Amino acid sequence: MFSNGSYATVWNVTTDDNGRVKVELSTSRKDRESGQYTTDFSSKYVNFVSDAKAVGADLQRGDRIRIDECGVSNGYNKETQKGYTNFFVFKAEKVERRSTPESATDEDALPF
């Protein structure tokens, strides 16, 4: 879930010409019945702003973070008749990854 206190896996980081940092990340949860982890949030466009901007700029694929403060906004463009949602991380920290099974791959959203 994308929320304060959640842990996320980083898949990509981009910085545009204006210095905005966008991070592709995902979160997952463990299914109680199967014991498998399933992705419950994924976005290519999470904006790292404020205190999180420096953290976001230093992230690399496979890094794990804890989201300390985040928010969501949405809107609607009448001209294009399209809705949009913006995800923001205001404060985050990089955390060390726990040991994972050798069968896990880079494409998996690994549990923390």
Image: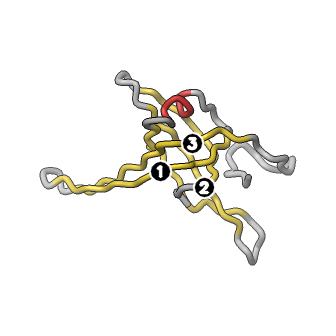
What residue would you read off at disc 2? 6
Choose between 72 and 111: the one closer to the eye: 72
Q: Is residue 28 left or right of residue 54?
A: right
**Residue 48 percent across, percent down from the top left:** 46, 38
* Residue 74, quarter of picture: bottom left
Amino acid at dot 1: Cys
Say which element carries label 1.
strand
Q: Name the residue located 48 percent from the left edge and 30 percent from the top edge.
A: 14
Type of amino acid under label 3: Ala
Q: Are marks 2 and 1 in contact (CB under 8 Å)?
A: yes
Residue drawn at (71%, 42%), measured in percent from left and top?
A: 106
Q: Amino acid at mark 2?
A: Ser
Q: Residues within 10 Å of mark 2 (few under 14, many from 20)?
A: some
Instruction: Quote the CA–CA distance across marks 2 and 3.
Output: 10 Å
The residue beneath circle 3 is: 92
Cα separation between marks 2 and 1: 10 Å
The quarter of the image holding the N terminus is bottom right
Sooner in the amino-acid sequence: mark 3 or mark 1: 1
In three-dimensional space, the C-alpha distance between marks 3 and 1, rounded to whole angstroms, equals: 9 Å
Circle 1 sits on which residue?
70
Task: Indicate the secondary structure of the residue bearing disc 2.
Answer: loop
